[in-house]
Structure formats: C-alpha cells, structure tokens
Image (cartoon, rainbow, N blue to C red):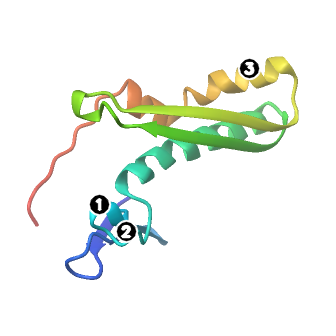
Amino acid sequence: MTIDCRTDPPGSLRHVLRIGPHTLVADMPFEAGGDDGGPSSHDLFDASLAACMAQTAVMYARLHQLSLERVLLHVERDASREREGTYALNVTVGFEGDLSVDQRARMLQIIDRCPVHKLMTVRTIEIRTVAA
C-alpha cells in the first residue's frame, strides 16, 4: 500500500492524498494559514484511531455473533502538552445493540487493543525520509 500526496493548488497548505482508489484532502484551519478545505494532519491521525477502534468492535462482534448494530465514538484531542511529549486523546465509546453489560465491558477492552492503538502506544515506528 502506498500513499501519494500533492500540494493543490500550488503554494497552499491544502494537499490531495491518494490511497489506492481513494482520495482524501488535508488542509489546515484558517487560523493556521490554511483554507480549511479538509481535516488537518492531526485530525487524520486522530481519526485513524477512531476508525480502527470502531472497526475492531464490529469485527469482534461478528466473530462472536454479538448483536452490535452501531459503534459511536467521540474523540477529543488535548495537544496542550504536545511540545513536552504528551499528546492525549480522550475517547468516549457507545455501542448500540442488544448487548449485556459484560459484553459491553469486553468490547471496551477489545477496542483498546486495535492495531492503530497499539501503533500509537506500544510500538516503535521508524520513518525514513529521502529526497525524490
């Protein structure tokens, strides 16, 4: 899998990302000098956690034949200490469906083990940048 990213229009903070057959737009808010034409890179980072947690819950429910109808996640970012090395994401999760209290508790445990959560919290990520 590859991601291609291109400034568009030239000189702006707006970027078009192509991920396989999908196209996303990233930009910065007006107050940061962008045109607010899409989510910021931080927003996309945070959204990847929300999507992974929700998908993990649905896959777990399918595997165990649980009556999960919908997952609702709300992510709030606290980047106030990012420069000191702490980036906090507070996640509130809701599960719709005919689930017992124990099943809901287990789902909360499971989604904290989603692959993106692991990448963000317990894995070493190596990034190598080279000139084209």
- Whole-percent x, y for residue 132 in the image: 11, 67
- Whole-percent x, y for residue 41 in the image: 36, 55
Residue at the far right: name it. Answer: 98
Question: Where 78 sits versus 130, above or below?
Answer: above
Question: Where 113 sits versus 43, above or below?
Answer: above
**Which marked residue is nearer to the observer: mark 1 or mark 3?**
1
Q: Quadrant of residue 25?
A: bottom left
Q: Between residue 46 and residue 30, name the one nearer to us.
A: 30
Dots 1, 3 in contact, CB < 8 A: no
**How dense is the environment of label 1, judged by Cα within 10 Å: few (below 14), some, or many (20 and up)?**
few
- What numbered label is drawn on residue 17? 2
Check disc 1 and give the amino acid type.
Answer: Ala
* Element type at mark 2: strand
Q: Is residue 12 left or right of residue 27?
A: left
Q: Which residue carries the number 3 mark?
A: 105
- How much space separates mark 1 and mark 3, taking CA atoms? 40 Å
> Which residue appears at 61% of the width and 41% of the height?
74
Q: Between residue 107 and residue 34, name the one nearer to us.
A: 34
